[in-house]
Image (cartoon, rainbow, N blue to C red):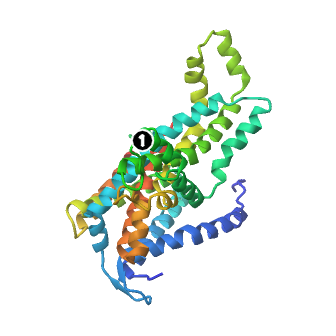
């Protein structure tokens, strides 16, 4: 007879989490799949359409453009926020009064609600009265984020970098604080340069936290909605209409629930694939 | 939730996959990680996930490039899943 203890009570312990995930993820996802196959004009009446909406979205220039803008935006902010966050974390003090001061300062942007960030930057960047807009114009730049696509992009990216680099800083700082002093002592004895300490001690030890930081920033920026919506409303034209903004316009503005549901599923699959590939390949040599 | 029988079959298929995987593991334990051709350590569950995710993209690609019907995509997905379970 086997001596292995089989305790099925553990299943009941995870039951609350299973129910929570079912209600906030699985059931809404099932609903979206159902909507993606049907057309509705309201009153809870649906007409089966098969895969029409998926074909429509896959061939839609509008979807391709929004996906391209979204990918470009995410790539740009990751290329800025991750190195900048690590650089700030490296420059932050390790002891003394400076530590809490820096940590509080770094946490402040994260505490501000997304729509408030959008509104703040909207006013801050207004070309006539905003501090940033007026200053740039008085310096001779022809800056107007409501009219010029480049300015709208630059302002949206600056806003995201201002709002979210702190998250990377805090994660990287936590990772750096967890490195034992012995490593630095050994490096000093070996006469390692500042770059060598970063390349061979700090960066490898930051691998896990940076993986989490990149994943969080990727998923968050790929789903960005509120901040650019409040700042530019997706304009000028459609130049800052990212996937979420386009999705909401389609689902709520046009009440095209079927195509919006099909677009949501494709959107979800893209995020799932990129996150899975990135996480799996980054962590494949970890225990 | 506006169910259709087609979407019910879709979710039923995924539920059947999960149940079949559980029965398989119960009858013939062997879901420990192993090294595959992609240089990844995968369990049986991982291979099911890779098969399902890949199949979703095979279907989307087929729909976007060739169009309906999707029986060809189903066949390609099945071959893909067999390859994943054997080599990944």
Neighbour tally class for label 1: few under 14, some 14-19, many 20 plus, Cα within 10 Å? some
Q: Quadrant of the N terminus of chain A?
A: bottom right
Instruction: Kindly indicate the quadrant of the structure image that contains residue A105.
Output: top right
Q: Residue furthest right?
A: A97
State the SS at label 1.
loop
Q: Residue at x 68, y 21 (%)?
A: A183
Counting from the top left corner in percent of width and height, residue A29 is at 48, 70
Q: Is residue A17 left or right of residue A244?
A: right
Q: Is residue A200 left or right of residue A14?
A: left
Counting from the top left corner in percent of width and height, residue A261 is at 40, 71
Q: Nearer the viewer, residue A177 or A98?
A: A98
Q: Residue at x 69, y 55 (%)?
A: A2
Q: Is residue B3 above or below residue B44?
A: below
Counting from the top left corner in percent of width and height, residue A141 is at 40, 41
Instruction: Kindly indicate the quadrant of the structure image that contains residue B55.
Output: bottom left
Q: Nearer the viewer, residue B36 or A196?
A: A196
Q: Quadrant of the C terminus of chain A?
A: top right
Instruction: Kindly indicate the quadrant of the structure image that contains residue A176.
Output: top right
Q: How many marks?
A: 1
């Amino acid at each position: 007879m086997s001596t292995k203890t089989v305790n099925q009570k553990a299943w009941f312990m995870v039951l609350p989490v299973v129910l929570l995930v079912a209600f906030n993820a699985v059931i809404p996802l099932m609903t979206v799949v159902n909507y993606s196959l049907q057309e509705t004009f309201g009153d809870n009446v649906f007409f089966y359409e098969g895969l029409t909406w998926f074909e429509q979205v896959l061939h839609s220039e509008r979807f391709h453009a929004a996906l391209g803008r979204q990918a470009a935006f995410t790539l740009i902010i990751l290329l800025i926020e991750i190195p900048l966050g690590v650089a700030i974390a490296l420059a932050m003090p390790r002891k003394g009064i400076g530590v809490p001061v820096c940590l509080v300062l770094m946490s402040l942007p994260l505490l501000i609600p997304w729509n408030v960030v959008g509104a703040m930057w909207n006013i801050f960047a207004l070309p006539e009265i905003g501090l940033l807009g007026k200053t740039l114009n008085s310096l001779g730049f022809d800056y107007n984020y409501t009219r010029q696509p480049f300015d709208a992009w630059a302002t949206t990216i600056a806003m995201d970098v201002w709002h979210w680099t702190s998250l990377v800083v805090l994660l990287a700082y936590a990772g750096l604080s967890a490195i034992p002093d012995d490593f630095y002592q050994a490096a000093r004895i070996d006469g390692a340069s500042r770059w060598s300490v970063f390349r061979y001690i700090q960066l490898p030890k930051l691998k896990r936290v940076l993986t989490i930081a990149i994943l969080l920033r990727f998923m968050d920026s790929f789903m960005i909605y509120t901040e650019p919506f409040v700042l530019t409303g997706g304009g000028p034209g459609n130049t800052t209409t990212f996937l979420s903004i386009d999705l909401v316009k389609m689902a709520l503005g046009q009440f095209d629930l079927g195509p919006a549901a099909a677009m949501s599923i494709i959107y979800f699959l893209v995020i799932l694939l990129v996150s899975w590939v990135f996480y799996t390949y980054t962590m494949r040599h970890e225990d | 939730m506006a169910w259709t029988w087609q979407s019910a079959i879709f979710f039923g298929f995924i539920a059947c996959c999960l149940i079949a995987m559980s029965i398989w593991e119960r009858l013939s334990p062997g879901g420990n990680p192993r090294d595959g051709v992609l240089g990844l350590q995968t369990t049986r569950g991982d291979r099911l996930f890779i098969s399902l995710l890949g199949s979703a993209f095979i279907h989307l690609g087929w729909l976007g490039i060739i169009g309906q019907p999707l029986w060809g995509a189903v066949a390609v997905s099945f071959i893909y899943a067999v390859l994943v379970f054997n080599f990944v």
